[in-house]
Amino acid sequence: MCKSSSLIFVLIFAFAFRLEKFSLRLVAVILVIFGGVLLMVASETAFVLSGFLLVMTASACSGLRWSLTQMLIRDKNMGMDNPAATIFWLSPIMGLTLATTSIVWEGWRNVFATPYFDSSASTINTSLLLTVPGVLAFCMVMSEF
């Protein structure tokens, strides 16, 4: 329910960065989409404040990410004029940021000390369970671009 608000944040950041001209028609379309998703799942959940705040923060960051990516793609001097080039240049930075956060937050000793990495078979199984969704996520991001 809250995740559908990412459309609203994309629109807000698009207006803020002047990527899109303000249009009541566009705002109405986004609100109708958001309202439809909201009505579809409104009675199916229980409200948890911490979860709500986390998902809304993720939605806001998602809207900011798409607007900043649009700004990068629009600027031909940056060399990111197509989706594959954008992912090629941004993925290492995102990977390093995620790895650094993971080291600080979780500690890799703790991660590799779990049963998921205690034998060769479990390490291969864990690697496959991480790689296959990663490939699917990559394909999804490419299709979104």
Image (cartoon, helix red, strand yellow):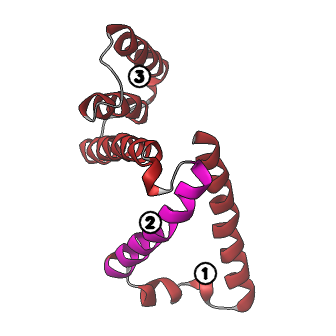
The crowding category of the residue bearing disc 1, from other C-alpha atoms within 10 Å (few below 14, some 14 to 19, many at least 20), is some
For the residues bearing labels 3 and 1, Cβ distance under 8 angstroms: no
**On the image, numbered disc 1 is attached to which residue?**
116
Q: Main secondary structure of the magenta part?
A: helix
Mark 2 burial class by Cα count in 10 Å: few <14, some 14-19, many 20+: few
**Residue 60: image x %, image y %?**
31, 41
Residue 42: mark in rendering? 3
Is label 2 in a helix, a strand or a loop? helix
Give the extent of the magenta segment. 82-104
User: Which one is in front in this view, the residue at disc 2 or the one at disc 1?
Assistant: 2
The quadrant of the rendering that contains the C terminus is top right
Q: Quadrant of residue 6?
A: top left
| Numbered badge on residue 94 | 2
Cα–Cα span, label 3 and label 2: 34 Å
Q: Which mark is residue 25?
A: none
Asked where in the image residue 18 lies, by quadrant, the reply is: top left
In front: label 3 or label 2 = 2
94 drawn magenta: yes
Measured as percent of width and height from the top left, residue 65 is found at 38, 47
